[in-house]
Image (cartoon, rainbow, N blue to C red):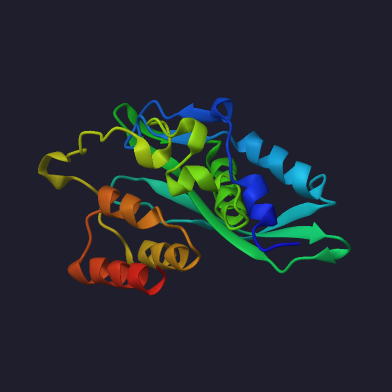
Amino acid sequence: MGNLEIYNKLKSVPQDCLKTIQAGRLKGMSDIKPQWRVLKMTEQFGPCGFGWKYKVTNRLFTDKDSFGQVAVFIDIDLFIKIGDTWSDAIPGCGGSTFIANEKNGLYMSDEAVKMATTDALSVAMKMLGVGADVYMGHGGKYDSGTSEQKAEPQEKKTYPEDNRPWLTEKLLRVVLDRIASGDDEVAKKTFETYKMKKEYKEQINSQIEKYK
């Protein structure tokens, strides 16, 4: 089996398995429907639990920030089976907002853990090439502006009087760990969402350079 055999089988995403993000900072960009990833993994390796599987290795709820908001982060290990041999762990990390400060007050999401787990699985599966064309920005069938990298630029979100919460040391450690695990979006999201000390920003940028 060639090094790129599995990667090439998993990289292309059909147009009908992409969905456009309708709101928030990523409005207008495309996201891959999670069930498509399950379909491709099952086609390639067999049913979940027999040809591929995962286990949750860590779950972290952050402390409330100054606005009462809480995030949840999930770490998973993904395993695939080729022949009679199970792979080493393929790590993935994901996050989601558990308690958000919305215009009508605090909102607790009962989907947060599931969404963080789905996010972690997508990060791990990306290492195998699942949906790689979207992440590479040359998606073939959807290269006309629907891929994540081809989305029209959005007006940058501004924060009146910069009322963003401060990045805590505990959350900084989570962000640095996620960068080290291959999450190439967490730094951007963190810079947009939080105010932070100069040394925290320097640590994040240093971590990005280290794990390019």
Farthest residue, direction left: 161
Could you tell me residue 95's position as x and y percent?
48, 50
Q: Residue at x 32, y 26 (%)?
A: 104
Q: Is residue 80 visible?
A: yes
171 versus 67 height, above or below: below
Q: Residue at x 29, y 45 (%)?
A: 67
Image-quadrant location for residue 55: bottom right
Image-quadrant location for residue 174: bottom left
Give the side of residue 78 with respect to residue 133, left or right: right
Could you tell me residue 196's position as x and y percent?
23, 61
Look at the image and tell me in which quarter the N terminus lies.
Answer: bottom right
Could you tell me residue 142's position as x and y percent?
47, 31
Q: Nearer the viewer, residue 7 or 26?
A: 7
Q: Is residue 59 visible?
A: no
Could you tell me residue 69's position as x and y percent?
37, 45
Give the side of residue 197 with respect to residue 193, left or right: left
Q: Residue at x 30, y 73 (%)?
A: 206
Q: Nearer the viewer, residue 165 or 51?
A: 51
Look at the image and tell me in which quarter the C terminus lies.
Answer: bottom left
1 versus 139 height, above or below: below
Give the side of residue 182 with respect to residue 191, left or right: right
Image-quadrant location for residue 114: top right
Q: Residue at x 33, y 71 (%)?
A: 209
How many dots with numbers?
0
